Amino acid sequence: MSLYISSLNSGSNGNCYYIGNQNEAVLIDAGLSCRDTETRMTRLGLSMKIVKAVFISHEHTDHTRGAQVISRKYQIPVYTSAGTFNSRRISVDPDKVMHFTAYSPVNIGNLAVSAFPKRHDAFDPHSFTITGNGITVGVLTDLGSSCEHVITNFSKCHAAFLEANYDEEMLENGLYPYILKSRIRSDYGHLSNRQSLDLFKQHKPEFMSHLLLSHLSQDNNNPRLVLELFEKHCGSTRVSIASRHHESKVFHITGEMAPGLSGNPEIVNQRSIQMWLF
């Protein structure tokens, strides 16, 4: 009863998340080049040979950049919503494209990938849960708000990649033009650190063992701020940062909480925090 997960990269420069068992895996988004995806997986001891599909959340380039080459090279399908594909902003060979429908799971071997709608400034955006071996992992990024779909699915997860895009004060006092600040803060933009924490505090299931805070802004956030914000509330959940510069380690999600966990080692390990800084 377990799954293996890793963030290969998380941020506006590229998003790609690996979820799998010992026999098959999927990539959620393909915002890295094929070469970078392969390189990072090799460093982690992961193999593209067991990746059976790519699922695309929406058409923005930082989620789709490597999809066409990965699909062509490894002869695997790319799943998108019909709205995302019809936006004509995603380049994938048509014969490799498959469509998913919200809340209709797609079975990839022993993995079941279920998409659900979210609010974001894209044509038909979705997030995902991946279930296998009795474990559910969520990939919830690029969220304008914690809508009912996000809340319902987050509360099912043993582990999740959850957006914490910006610190409100840093965004307000930063150099972005007002129109861009308004877009980011809108219900179709991104979640702030505090919005992410509110979702975590109010809807985290007791069995959630791992949370990877994801899609941090390079200009409007700082990993230290996020970790300090979550530190008092993490309990037995291990909270870490999904970097925009390198892959995370591979986390083994077993459905069991770490015995005697105190003070969350992902947070108090200062050497690790230094590695997460931008």
Image (cartoon, rainbow, N blue to C red):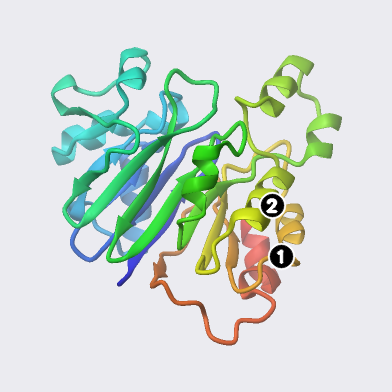
Residue 107 appears at what percent x and percent y?
20, 47
Under circle 2, the secondary element is helix
Q: Quadrant of the N terminus?
A: bottom left
Q: Amino acid at mark 2?
A: Leu
Q: Residue at x 35, y 63 (%)?
A: 135
The Cα atoms of the two marked residues, 2 and 1, are separated by 8 Å
Residue in the foreground of this view, choosing between 42 and 84:
84
Which disc, if any, is residue 181? none
Q: Nearer the viewer, residue 46 or 106?
A: 106
Per the image, the residue denoted by label 2 is: 197
Q: Is residue 267 visible?
A: yes
Give the quadrant of residue 89.
top left
| Dots 2, 1 in contact, CB < 8 A | yes
Which quadrant of the figure has residue 57? top left
Give the residue type that dot 1 points to: His
Q: Position of residue 32 (x, y in %)?
A: 40, 38
Q: Residue at x 38, y 73 (%)?
A: 254
- In the displayed structure, 54 sits above or below 273; it is above
The number of numbered discs placed on residues in the rendered structure image is: 2
Q: Which residue is mark 1?
A: 233
Q: Is residue 224 left or right of residue 32?
A: right
- Earlier in the chain: of badge 2 and badge 1, it is 2
Q: Residue at x 54, y 53 (%)?
A: 242
Identify the residue at image location x=42%, y=57%.
Answer: 6
Q: Of helix, strand and loop, which one carries label 1?
A: loop
Q: Nearer the viewer, residue 39 or 162?
A: 162
Relative to 117, residue 204 above or below: below
Residues packed near mark 1 inside 10 Å, few (<14), some (14 to 19) or many (20 plus): few
> Horizontal and vertical percent for residue 78?
24, 33
Pick the front one: 224 or 255: 255
Q: How many neighbours does mark 2 have within 10 angstroms: few (below 14), some (14-19), or many (20 or more)?
A: many
Image quarter of residue 167: top right
